Amino acid sequence: MALYLLFESSSGYALFHAQGLDEIGQNTEAVRNSVSDLNRFGKVVQLTAFQPFESALDGLNQCNSVSEGLMTDELRSFLELNLPKVKEGKKSKFSLGVAEPKLGSHISETTKIPCQSGEFVLELLRGVRLHFDKFIKDLKSGDLEKAQLGLAHSYSRAKVKFNVNRVDNMVIQAIFLLDTLDKDINSFSMRVREWYSWHFPELVKIVNDNYLYARVAKLIEDKSKLSEEHVPALTEILGDKDKAKEIVEAGKASMGQDLTPVDLINVQLFAQRVMDLAEYRKNLYDYLVTKMNDIAPNLASLIGEVVGARLISHAGSLTNLAKCPSSTLQILGAEKALFRALKTRGNTPKYGLIFHSSFIGRASAKNKGRMARYLANKCSIASRIDCFAERGSTVFGEKLREQVEERLEFYDKGVAPRKNIDVMKSAIESTQSKDTEMEEAQPDEASAKKSKKKKSKTEDAPAAVATNGGDASEDAKSEKKKKKKEKRKIEQEMDHEEEETNGVNKDVAEQDGTAKKKKKKSKDEVATDETKKKKKKKAQE
């Protein structure tokens, strides 16, 4: 059976015919040894056809389709023209060697050309890639390298630009940074407590919160200067007047040692740094909430923004999370416990990252596993809706959250929950009603904008005339006078022509610079006027 090799280069498609494979016996080691020598390899593999790409954009499109395992129309026509034709009902006497198995399966499905891809074919294609510039005569030295470099740059740029998971990357980075900030702020605030406790040890028992402790330490500075004047400022920070008075009284009878001004300055600077980190952590949390509402609104409304972001980051992307079954999503984050249980033949974990949800905490001990399974089911539905829906909305997430609440009531009180079909029907109806409202609101907004534009134009016209000043008005008047004069001249010339042809005198009257309409006499009146003129002439003679 003859073997043909399809090689996708950066400059075009090439088809090679491998001969003498029966003598080699399809031994990969023999092929591997003969690849380096062009004389031996050239006897086995020969070029049969080459089709260059039309442009760099065409090459990029072909490369994208090959990487996805799809056969383009150009590749199909190239193969059908250069490969021997197969008669219907008979087996083909050749096979096509392809580097990509997905591409080979697609070619065999559409064109019925038998394809193969194995170690033997890959070794032959490796030799083709090594000596490709010598097989094609028209290629100059350096042309192939330039084409490879340009195609690699455009392909990588397109992959980065059109990455499906590029929006999820922001959420993944934000949740990672949020976790590291929590650890850093906790350790830094403990360092502030320990450092300032040498000077004011009683403050630790009064103020428990780390952020408030840093703010109070920044405000007090030196405990010996504490007085009743600091009470209002302390109440603003703590929100409790009794605690503020307690701090002032404790400062008067404190057992701590005195610090030098330089030490106090360093403590204050470090406390300010902790406060800045805490403020940045709040801003980052707000950014994460808004980003999750844009990317996965249903998942965020169901399980919360932080837990949803942790699920997305652990899965790698929203698409990967949508592909996960609910059983995998249930134990996502508890992989170590799962493999340890499988190894020791113990009980497998019931929940992973999903445990941080408030629903599982509210469930009783015996119902935590069932609640985790039910919540994982709803989370998988919400993630798939967020991933594949065209428009993002929180309708499905709110309905799924209502279902989880009903299931909690069912476990606690025995109240029967609604059916899933009824809940999904109501969610679909609400989304359709919202879509119709949006479509109706769009033409109303467009008409309002047009009316506003017309009003603005009419308002701008007199204002522009007023701002131009007297010069502009005088120019406009002079232009109008000129136009009127020209009209008058034209009208007078037309009147003279009519008098010469018809012999009739017509009166021309003008009022306020406008010409009146001309009145034409009938033929009978013209005849009577001519007879009167003749009689007058005879009387004069």
Image (tube, rainbow, N blue to C red):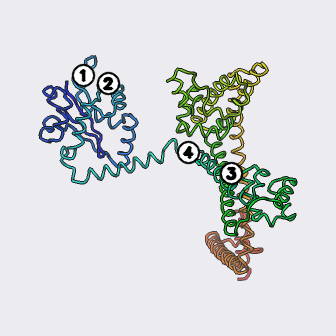
Say above or below: 220 vs 14. Answer: below
Q: Which residue is mark 4?
A: 167
Q: Which residue is mark 3?
A: 282
Q: Earlier in the sequence, mark 3 or mark 2?
A: 2
Query: Residue at point 73% right, 65% down?
Result: 258
Q: Which residue is mark 1?
A: 92
Q: CA distance from mark 3 to mark 4?
A: 21 Å
Q: Residues within 10 Å of mark 4 (few under 14, many from 20)?
A: some
Image quarter of the N terminus: top left
Element at badge 2?
A: loop
Element at badge 4?
A: helix
- Badges 2 and 1: C-beta atoms under 8 Å apart? yes
Q: CA distance from mark 1 to mark 4?
A: 48 Å
- Residue 34 point in image, percent of width and height: 16, 37
Q: CA distance from mark 3 to mark 2?
A: 61 Å
Hey, what amino acid is under mark 4? Val
